[in-house]
Image (cartoon, rainbow, N blue to C red):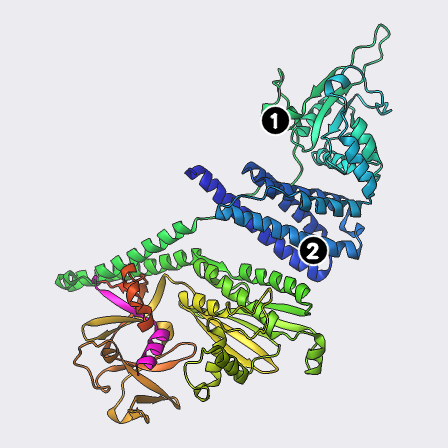
Amino acid sequence: MDNGMESMLDTYLFETNSLLDNLDEMLMRDEKLGDFSPDDVNEIFRIMHTIKGSSAMMEFGSLSSIAHHIEDLFFYIRDKGIDSLDAQHKKELFNLMFRSEDCLRGEVEKVENGEPLSTDMDSFAAEINSFLKKISGAPEEKAEEANQTAKAPSETPAETASSLPENLPDDKQAACFLHVFLEEGVGMENLRAYMIINALKECELDFRYYPENMESNPDTCSSIIENGFFMAFESVDVAAKAGDILRTQNHIRSYELVEIPEEEPEAAPVPANVPVSNSEASQPQEAAAPDPKPKAPPKQPAQGTPVKQNLISVNLMKLDSLQNLVGEIVITESMVTSSPELNQLSRDAYDNFMKSARQLRKLTDDLQDISMSLRMVPISGVFQKMSRIVRDMKQKLGKDVRLTLIGEDTEVDKTIVDSIQDPIMHMVRNAMDHGIEDTSEERVQAGKSAQGEIILSATHTSSEVVISIADDGKGMNPEKLLAKARDKGILTKPENQYSRKEALGLVMLPGFSTNQTVTEYSGRGVGMDVVKKNVESVGGVVDLSSEEGKGTTFTMKIPLTLAIMDGMKVTVGNSIFTISIANIRQSFKITPDEVIRDENGCEIIERMGSFYPVIRLHQFYNIETTVTNLAEGILLWVETSDSSFCLFVDELIGEQQVVVKPLPAFLNYFNLKDFGISGCTILGDGNISIILDIQSLHAAALENA
């Protein structure tokens, strides 16, 4: 695929996915209200019209076909008004639209994965048509009879053009008629014809049409199949404009312009019939037969004047390149300001240089903020997908549950949003299947409301986003989890040595499931371990709390971005380490009498009424240093979501915004991430500083203690 086609495909996928996301949000909102608003009916019609056109352009027939049938359905609903449907029809329409959305998404995923599209969409198209017949009042047997009649051979345009049609409408004011024939077997010919009529009406053309009651009388199908339908014009010019528009319409086999002869005493002129074949009708306007006199373009529908577009879509790879470039600028700026040659400048020259350097630093910081903000997207898109999951599971599991969304406008790095979508989905499904009670009676007996609730919330601090999934269901019993883990043989120490938090954490082990049977949603022992793995892969942590009978809460803490962070540089011997500012609570010095030893001889320090273990970095990484006395070095009180301790280092260098660089691939063999090393950064003098991961560092220190 060349670059042009690849760019078109990317644009198509972005646009189509955006439209489907918009459709899903609209359907979820309207289903809660129990009705479609007129604006939403029009919007769904426009969405399907856009998907139909763009899919046809890309030659994705299955997508274009389904979108076209839904467009026909909403054309009728838009014309008749949504209030013409009763409550049962609206319920069926919601279910049909959700299935249609799933069908379209499935085909789009095939396009994204390079898989062949479905070739048989007849059954689903028939389902849409059947629903349209139901709400339009078209009897099924008459529709079948009309389809059979349509298959019979009909007159060709050339034969019809030989004389005035016998069934020409009696319209004394008409100067000419357009006689239109539809394609054979399209079905619901009265509605198809009315859609064409309405398309011309939207272009503000003045005409009358026959049969006059085609939109409300299904019996007109047979006459339209046999004799076509007519549009009466008082001006040949208006009819010519209408003919130009007809070339852009679907389902037209042929049409002809029939001029009414003027009454003259000497002789009646021969009618000028202009037949147009199906191939001509289906071609764009520029492919039509040349006209010696150019016609004015038809007046387009009044849809508002075009406005300047303020949003553009950008390839994520370009943003990655921009982020890397900004990172290199940060590193280079640091190299310049820390150059040893600056010491040779005079005092005035040095002051002027540092003044300019401070201005450069300000501009560099602004550039970093802007480049990072370009990658930030609201998490509402992920949250909205969870609404759909809850909706579908409610119907299949028979549970009455509402989903409450809080903080969906919270923005996160695009890469992180893509990584946490699956974890959030697993936790929501887990809450629906495991957490919420099976029946409303169980909840009422437990003193709860009959309707369960799942709360999905997102908040962010200066450096991380906190996402929680809470349900008010059954909760979890740590003893039962331990018993289940014992039966599966996945315990790593005696049961009595497990704390409550560790026992709850067993649900995130591979192969662990509390379901006795395998269902569509759970019971296979996969899911929660994937959650933990995916969240940790982006530098986040998962925390679980539960109280039996009251509910369960999963909390994810994830960095806002993976590219740039505020770090504190520290030295240990000749090595320089960087620790995220977000993990540091305090830095302090102590006196020898403040050091306390526990029963195992490990050093602990008391801060604010609590005691924290001390990890000596030079011992952990076996680094030679002259600073071994706790009173001589610096202690950093650090913490993550579920651990807090003190790090002993030689000294602090200072705070600096650093660019996070991944470790080289050949180092993956050593599993450095399991030993507290998450990446590296390049300092201003060209040296490399190791970035420490406080969470894994604490876990590794406990394991080696």
Q: Quadrant of residue 457?
A: bottom right
Q: Along the line of sight, which residue is nearer the eye, 477 or 614?
A: 477
Position above or below: 685 against 325: below
Query: Can the viewer see residue 612 in this picture?
Result: yes
Q: Amino acid at mark 1?
A: Gln
Label 2 crowd (10 A; few <14 / some 14-19 / many >=20): some
Label 1 crowd (10 A; few <14 / some 14-19 / many >=20): some
Q: Please tell me whether residue 208 belongs to the stretch shown in magenta.
A: no
Residue 534 at x, y percent in the picture = 44, 65
Mark 2 = which residue? 95
- Provide the secondary structure element on which disc 2 rests: helix
Please tell me whether mark 2 or mark 1 is closer to you in this view: 2
- Provide the secondary structure element on which disc 1 rests: helix
Q: Please tell me whether residue 701 belongs to the stretch shown in magenta.
A: yes
Q: Quadrant of residue 429?
A: bottom right
Position above or below: 567 against 548: above
Position above or below: 157 against 672: above
Q: Quadrant of the C terminus?
A: bottom left
Residue 555 at x, y percent in the picture = 50, 73
Label at residue 463: none
Residue 139 at x, y percent in the picture = 83, 43
Q: Provide the residue span drawn in magenta.
A: 685-705
Q: Residue at x 50, y 66 (%)?
A: 423
Q: Along the line of sight, which residue is nearer the eye, 623 or 184?
A: 184
Mark 1 = which residue? 285
Query: Can the viewer see residue 559 in this picture?
Result: no
Q: Residue at x 43, y 77 (%)?
A: 641
Question: Is residue 468 shown left or right of residue 631?
Answer: right
